[in-house]
Image: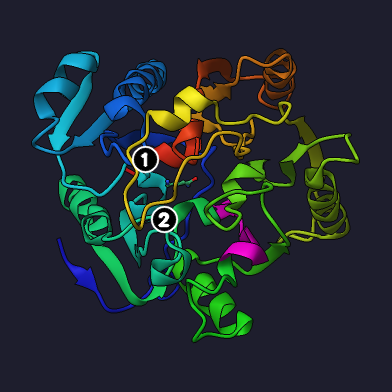
Amino acid sequence: MKTLQTSPKKDGYRMPGEFEAHKGVYLLWPERPDNWREGAKPAQATFAKVAAAISEFETVTVGVSDRQYTNARHMLADNVTVVEMSNDDSWIRDCGPTFVVNDKGDIRGVDWTFNAWGGLVDGLYFPWDKDDRVAQKVCELEHRDRYRLDDFILEGGSIHVDGEGTLIVTEECLLSDGRNTQLSKGQIESILKEYLNVEKIIWLKKGIYLDETNGHVDNIANFVKPGQIALAWTDDQSDPQYAISKENYDILTHETDAKGRHLQVEKLYLPKPILITAKESEGVDAVDGTLPRLEGDRLAASYVNYYTANGGIIFPLFDDPMDEKAKATLQELYPDRKIVGVPAREILLGGGNIHCITQQIPAGR
Ligand code: KQY
């Protein structure tokens, strides 16, 4: 595996939309007891269900520490490949590679610097060096050359593309104090255009209310296909989320994409606010430097945090009356895909959801 000194744009590679064909998907196995309650046992059961659900549609590989290898192998279905891969936590959307493809179907990885969502400013744990090596290791396993950006911090959950030149991001995240403060917004745009090979960047303002990633776009908006976006929504004007979603709705409906199309914005209704219970809070080990999980804290629950697989959509269930509506909306948006819900409260308790724990490999050739 080579580390390349050029850029995807110079070499004719682009980031495909998630809705394009995949070779497979990677996950990382959860285990840290200061983020996952009860020694991560409930989270592990949920990750196993997510892996099983996706494996109906594409090949699944799960990276796991040596300490957890035997347990993970036991808990995961036989059609899931388990490989040893050191990590600091299980958010491969964010620390894994962003794959880019060329017109011949060749694939390369983009390996951004990862700093646990804000480094020493407002990052969620320390250290994060094992996570920062995950992208390189996935490229090794996939036999793909990579571009490495040593001086640019980015997580995969903070970007979504339409595969046809358009990128959506949030200002809350990409302009946050813990990421690339040495760069202007224009310089950040130039790097994204060079490494994702996009022409148009649509800047949303904020992500989901109280999202601990500084408002990742993948929790609030996603491309269903070029020209169509699913946006997390509530009609409850007394909820702080309403103003956030409305501002983003206004931006998106007044924007055009890289091809000059007006965007069709589809509202994906949120569940009612979900709070951490006393029992859930007590199950998490308290460790200095890790975000505490306190009783009554509101979680950043959103159905937009779904994974688009070959022929399927794997979306989070919250045991909420809106689960059914979310399923129906997703079925309308994706008439040709099977919509599969997985109870995901245990992932939500760790600070993210199904999209955040996945990283797809494009089909390529
Ligand atoms: O949502 C994500 N992409 C990751 C959330 C990380 C939470 C760490 N506790």
- Left or right of 98? Residue 333 is right
Q: Quadrant of residue 83?
A: top left
Residue 56 numbered mark, or none:
none
The CA span between labels 2 and 1 is 10 Å
Can you give x and y, in whole percent of width and height, for residue 112 in the image? 36, 65
Q: How is the image coloured?
A: rainbow
Is 39 in front, or is 315?
A: 39
At horizontal 79% and vertical 61% (from top left) the residue drawn is: 260
The quadrant of the rendering that contains the N terminus is bottom left
Are there few (<14), some (14-19), or many (20+) residues within 10 Å of tag 2? many
Location of residue 320 in the rendering, given as x and y in whole percent from the top left corner: 68, 16
Range covered by the magenta-colored residues: 159-173
> Are the residues tagged 2 and 1 within 8 Å (C-beta)?
yes
Mark 1 is surrounded, within 10 Å at the Cα level, by few (under 14), some (14 to 19) or many (20 or more) other residues, namely: many
At horizontal 8% and vertical 37% (from top left) the residue drawn is: 66
On whether ligand 1 comes within 8 Å of the CB at mark 1, the answer is yes
Does 175 sit left or right of 50 as displayed?
A: right
Where does residue 217 sit, x and y in percent of width and height? 61, 51
**Tag of residue 124:** 2
* Kind of residue indicated by mark 2: Leu
User: Which residue is tagged 1?
Assistant: 35
Could one spot residue 108 in this view of the protein? Answer: yes
**Residue 161 is one of the magenta-drawn residues:** yes
> Mark 2: is the Cβ under 8 angstroms from ligand 1?
yes
